[in-house]
Amino acid sequence: RLEYYEKMGGNENFDANIELQKLREDFEKYKKSTDRTIKSYNDLFNTLFLDLEWEANEVLRDMQILLNELIEFINTVAKRNDLKWWIDYGTLLGAVRHGTYVPWDDDSDISMIRKDYNKFCEVIQDEINHFGLDDIITVGFRERKIDDDTIDSFIRLFIYDKNKQGRRIIISGVDIFPYDYLKNYDKDKLDKMYYDAKLKYFRNIAKKMDYNEALKIMHDDINMSMEPAKYVVPGVEGAHGLRNLYKLKVWDADKLFPLSEVQLLNKTFPES
């Protein structure tokens, strides 16, 4: 903006410094107003989460019981195929804070290391068929918008029913996120490198590049590895979308593994 105002210097009534100061004052007013709004939200959430007891209503509770059974099925598939997985994000928050699901949750989140995630994607439909659950469980993918294209992102499993017309009605589901090993990184550069590589990866997929080739390019760009390494980061398909909206979280692999366990409803599952 300052460059623009300086270009306007030919106007004898224009003073760039005065205009810039006005902008700063306007911004400060906006910031104060926004800060007050955020504080009021925080006060409300503190009241809701700390001072009140919340429970899911009957219908939502039934959905959460179904979710738990779906996660137990995934656990069975993982054991049959020697795959590591753990509950994550909001599901982990609910398990730790409530011993069950967050009271208003109607889906769940789990994660896997990339190598196990890839294997899971390969075997899951056969496993569903093997257990005779193809009339109950369906496989889908989260869609992402990239430029003018829509592509598949992380895998999802849904419990469904059929209406009178035979149309599938989704009842509840599990999102499954990949994580990648990271060999080493520069903490001042990783965020930009990660989100640049993420955008490049999705654009390559949108161009119909083979998944393994696109994945290798991304791994080379960020120094990731399919094999165990010192650090672990969320896979680019994860919950945070395409843009750099969140600070990237990096874990020491030896702190993430071995996995521990946590109670979720009436079952015990792995957690990070």
Image: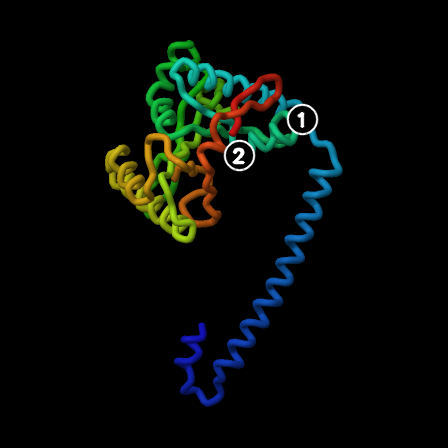
In the image, taking residue 59 as reference, residue 223 lies left or right, namely left
Question: Earlier along the polypeptide chain: callout 2 or callout 1?
Answer: 1
Q: Is mark 2 on a helix, strand or loop?
A: helix
Q: Looking at the image, is 252 positioned above or below residue 66?
A: below
Point out the frontmost of discs 2 and 1.
Answer: 2
> Which residue type carries mark 1?
Asn
- Indicate the position of residue 72 as horizontal and vertical percent values: 51, 17
> Which residue type carries mark 2?
Tyr
In the image, taking residue 230 as reference, residue 110 lies left or right, namely right
> By what rule are the colours in the image chosen?
rainbow
Q: What element carries label 1?
A: loop
Quarter of the image where one finds residue 233: top left
Q: Looking at the image, is 265 positioned above or below residue 254?
A: above
Q: Residues within 10 Å of mark 1 (few under 14, many from 20)?
A: few
| Residue 220 visible in the current orientation | yes
- Indicate the position of residue 260 as horizontal and vertical percent values: 54, 24
| Residue 163 visible in the current orientation | no
Residue on which disc 2 sits: 89
Q: Residues within 10 Å of mark 2 (few under 14, many from 20)?
A: few
Quarter of the image where one finds residue 78: top left
Residue on which disc 1 sits: 57
